[in-house]
Structures are given as structure tokens and as C-alpha cells.
Image: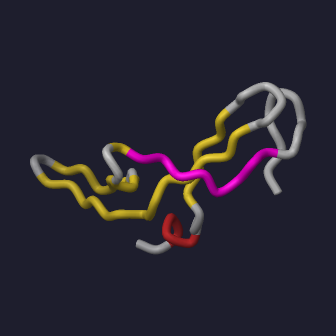
Amino acid sequence: MRSCIRCGTQMIEDCGLYQEGDWRRVMLEKGKSGLFQISRNIGPVMASVCPSCGEISIYIEDVNELKEG
């Protein structure tokens, strides 16, 4: 369960972020060197919304994707 960083209220989780019906994705970039860089998809971006103050928290579901590499 996520708690709002502003007011501490339990947030509504697992909300998706869409643009014209498509999931937003986060690309992790590492190893920038010259013209080349390594990019990989680390999964869909999710959101939680606070029903009290309206704060939005954006996160990825699987943090293990950050550890692999």
C-alpha cells in the first residue's frame, strides 16, 4: 500500500498512464559513450492517486528490472 507523501492518506494504486490508448514506457539509458548508448525498456509506468489531496505518484511495478543489466 502506498501512502501519500503530502498528507499520509492511503492512495488509489495501479492507475495507468495513457496517451492515445498506449501505455507509457520508461527507457533506462546507461553507458553513454560517444554516439552510442544502451537503452532498454524497464516496463510500464503506473500511477497512484491520493483521494484526499490529489497528489499523483508515478512508479514502475517491477524494480528488479532496474537491477538487471
Q: Which colour scheme is used?
A: secondary structure
Magenta residues, start to end: 11-18
Residue 30 location, x and y as percent?
33, 55
* Residue 28 in view in this figure: no
Q: Residue furthest left?
A: 35
Residue 36 location, x and y as percent?
14, 54
Residue at coordinates 34% horizontally, 54% vertically from top-left? Answer: 22
Q: Does the magenta stretch include residue 46?
A: no
Question: How many numbered callouts?
Answer: 0
Residue at coordinates 53% horizontally, 69% vertically from top-left? Answer: 67
Instruction: Name the residue nearer the viewer: 18 or 1.
Output: 18
Q: Which residue lies furthest to the right in this view?
A: 8
Residue at coordinates 71% horizontally, 30% vertically from top-left? Answer: 55
Residue at coordinates 35% horizontally, 51% vertically from top-left? Answer: 21
Residue 34 relative to residue 56: left or right: left
Chief SS of the magenta region: strand
Instruction: Name the residue nearer the viewer: 43 or 51.
Output: 51
Residue 43 relative to residue 67: left or right: left
66, above or below 32, in the image: below
Quadrant location, the N terminus? bottom right
35, above or below 54, in the image: below
Residue 55 relative to residue 68: left or right: right
Quadrant location, the C terminus? bottom left
Residue 2 location, x and y as percent?
79, 51
* Residue 51 in view in this figure: yes
63, above or below 25, in the image: below
Q: Residue furthest front?
A: 21
Residue 58 location, x and y as percent?
59, 44
Instruction: Name the residue nearer the viewer: 5 or 15.
Output: 15
Q: Does the magenta stretch include residue 14?
A: yes
